[in-house]
């Protein structure tokens, strides 16, 4: 088990008590400047994952399987359209990278943990939501106006996918007036558990996964502001370097993180879901929370673990 220590004075800089190659802060500081080609390959990595997810799922589950779970033929046909969109995104990004003289990443090997139609749809909803946050978060780093417009056109489609699947699952299709931007490392942290291996020939991307943070199975099904929940840190012990400083849970929003104190418990931390200040983006819908020792900002240098994904009503 790894131990993650951080200090408020150092803005929660992560120092992992393990070999130097696992020091996430050192790796991030040593990472090369991110280029447009890196961002397109990062997007292609996610599109490959989504493309394979839908192709595999729709090959494993028939229209009859969906009907047996209460979903009509329209849902199945629309999911085939979603799958086709993801395949088209893969082709588009591959061609754009090739035209720019960059090597596109190839499809990896994945394990999605899907066992039936319901887990397929639940995972699809999560992946589409993460896809929206990935494109939104990367947009500010894209230098080329042409690439930015292209990424924006994919973002809007991913958002429609997300809304449709949420509605299919009887969730609000638009639970918040704002979507949540995530950094490249935060998104990769969420994608990494699905990736078993990638071709050695794939270009190396300047992204790393943070220690895992997960919602405890014991948490209420209906989570709202004011709900007490537990977040787990499997395989990692997160604690302040001085042993006494406060640890915070930061809920990421487009208008800035919303902080709440996190109390250590066996295997993780307990906390109360906060309410955003008036005039700021609410903490609602598919939400993302990280652990940090800093209660003023969240950056890749202040994240100690996470994000975890929570559905907040």
Image: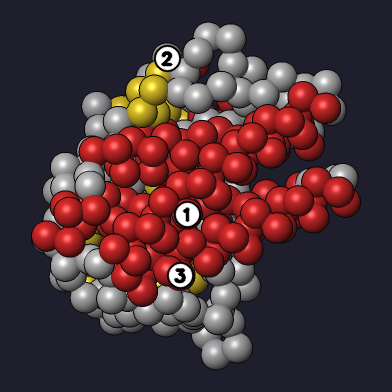
What kind of element bears circle 2?
loop
| Residue 173 in the image, given as x and y percentages of width and height | 42, 76
Give the quarter of the image for residue 247.
bottom left
| Residue 159 in the image, given as x and y percentages of width and height | 54, 64
Q: Badge 2 is on which residue? A: 19
| Residue 109 in the image, given as x and y percentages of width and height | 39, 23
Q: Residue at x 47, y 78 (%)?
A: 174
Crowding around mark 1 (Cα neighbors within 10 Å: few <14, some 14 to 19, many 20+) is some
Residue 194 showing in the rendered view? yes
Report whether 233 appears left or right of 108.
Answer: left
Q: Badge 1 is on which residue? A: 81
In the foreground, 72 or 96: 72
Mark earlier in primary sequence (3, 1): 1
Q: Residue at x 68, y 30 (%)?
A: 94
| Residue 55 in the image, given as x and y percentages of width and height | 39, 38
Residue 267 showing in the rendered view? no
Q: Badge 3 is on which residue? A: 163
Mark earlier in primary sequence (2, 1): 2
* Distance of label 2 from label 1 (alpha carbons): 46 Å
Identify the disc placed on residue 232.
none
Crowding around mark 3 (Cα neighbors within 10 Å: few <14, some 14 to 19, many 20+) is many
């Amino acid at each position: 088990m790894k131990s993650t220590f951080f200090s408020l004075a150092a803005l929660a800089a992560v120092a992992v008590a393990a070999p130097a190659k696992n020091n996430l802060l050192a790796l991030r500081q040593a990472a090369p400047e991110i280029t447009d080609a890196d961002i397109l390959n990062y997007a292609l990595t996610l599109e490959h994952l989504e493309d394979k997810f839908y192709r595999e799922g729709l090959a494993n589950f028939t229209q009859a399987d969906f009907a047996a779970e209460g979903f009509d033929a329209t849902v199945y046909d629309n999911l085939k359209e979603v799958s086709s969109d993801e395949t088209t995104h893969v082709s588009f990004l591959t061609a754009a990278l090739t035209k720019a003289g960059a090597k596109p990443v190839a499809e990896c090997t994945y394990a999605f943990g899907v066992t039936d139609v319901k887990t397929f749809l639940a995972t699809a909803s999560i992946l589409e939501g993460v896809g929206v946050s990935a494109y939104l978060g990367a947009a500010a780093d894209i230098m080329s106006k042409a690439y930015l417009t292209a990424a924006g056109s994919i973002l809007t489609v991913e958002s429609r996918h997300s809304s449709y699947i949420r509605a299919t699952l009887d969730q609000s299709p638009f639970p918040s007036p704002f979507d949540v931007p995530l950094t490249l490392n935060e998104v990769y942290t969420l994608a990494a558990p699905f990736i078993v291996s990638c071709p050695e020939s794939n270009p190396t991307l300047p992204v790393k996964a943070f220690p895992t943070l997960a919602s405890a199975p014991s948490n209420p099904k209906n989570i709202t502001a004011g709900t007490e929940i537990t977040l787990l840190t499997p395989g990692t012990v997160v604690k302040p370097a001085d042993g006494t400083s406060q640890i915070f849970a930061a809920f990421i929003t487009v208008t800035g993180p919303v902080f709440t104190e996190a109390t250590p418990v066996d295997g993780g931390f307990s906390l109360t879901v906060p309410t955003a200040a008036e005039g700021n983006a609410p903490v609602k819908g598919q939400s993302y929370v990280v652990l940090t020792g800093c209660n003023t900002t969240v950056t890749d240098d202040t994240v100690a673990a996470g994000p975890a994904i929570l559905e907040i009503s």
